[in-house]
Amino acid sequence: MNGLVIYYSKNGHTKTYAEMIGTKLECDVKDIRKTSKKELTKYDFVVFGSGVYIYKIKKVKKLMNIISPDKLVIYACGGSNNGEAMLPLVKEHSMTKEQSQQYSWFYLPGGMDVSLYKGIMSFVFKMMKRMLEKKETLTPDEQGLLDGINHPAFYVAEEHIDSLVQHIQKTYGLK
Ligand SMILES: Cc1cc2nc3c(=O)[nH]c(=O)nc-3n(C[C@H](O)[C@H](O)[C@H](O)COP(=O)(O)O)c2cc1C
């Protein structure tokens, strides 16, 4: 079985996970922005990872038009370490319920350091912080986001890819 790990990453957390997964599964690893449609169809399965940006993953629609659901596994890499709270929201914001049910999804905790952002992004985070701090009660995902804005966090670790790797090995018969 010939697999590809493909990613969309702004700050490197999603890319680091893609490289870890690629090493474990002995697969090619590519940036989606540098990969043609034709290349994507060469593989028996594709693992796609994207960072989470305002609850959404990016570029997944491009892949959904090219790769059938049985060949595509998705991971979302967010700034919160509460994947249980974040993943349902990410699915809901990224595609329709019917579409999201066709895929296997994983959440991998990335990291957040708002001091890395300048200009418009720095402004966006200030607004998000103000909005979240005004709310009387916060949901777990909102609390996770606020924690990430207030304190730099780095959650990337090899152990987080275990269940995704096991899923791929089992589904596609890899050792
Ligand atoms: C504009 C922006 C919006 C974000 N929104 C969310 C969010 O809604 N939920 C979340 O968990 N993390 C959010 N994050 C944090 C990123 O998901 C986190 O930094 C992740 O590790 C990004 O992956 P990357 O480093 O590969 O870009 C946001 C980050 C940015 C820059």
Image (tube, grey):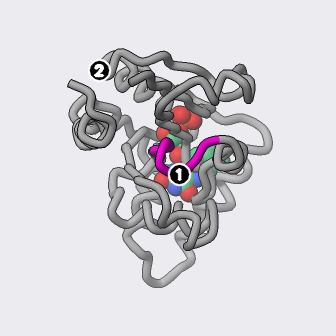
Mark yes or no: residue 6 visible.
yes
Residue at figure coordinates x 56%, y 73% from the top left: 97
| Amino acid carrying mark 2 in the image | Lys
Q: Residues within 10 Å of mark 1 (few under 14, many from 20)?
A: some
Which residue is at 50% across, 34% downward? 46
**Three-letter code, disc 1:** Pro
The relative height of residue 4 versus residue 82 in the rendered view (above or below) is above
Quarter that holds the C terminus: top left
Residue 31, by quadrant, is top right
Residue at x 61%, y 42% (from the top left corner): 67
Instruction: Choose mark 1 or mark 2, whichever is in front.
Output: 1
Toward the viewer: 42 or 124? Answer: 42
| Residue 164 quadrant | top left
Residue 145, which numbered label? none
- Judged from the image, the secondary structure of the residue bearing numbered disc 1 is helix
- Residue bearing mark 1: 69
Query: Which numbered disc, 1 or 2, marks the residue that appears first in the sequence?
Result: 2
Q: Position of residue 154 (x, y in %)?
A: 37, 35
Residue designated by label 2: 24
- Residue 7 rendering spot, x and y as whole percentages: 56, 31
Q: CA distance from mark 1 to mark 2?
A: 22 Å
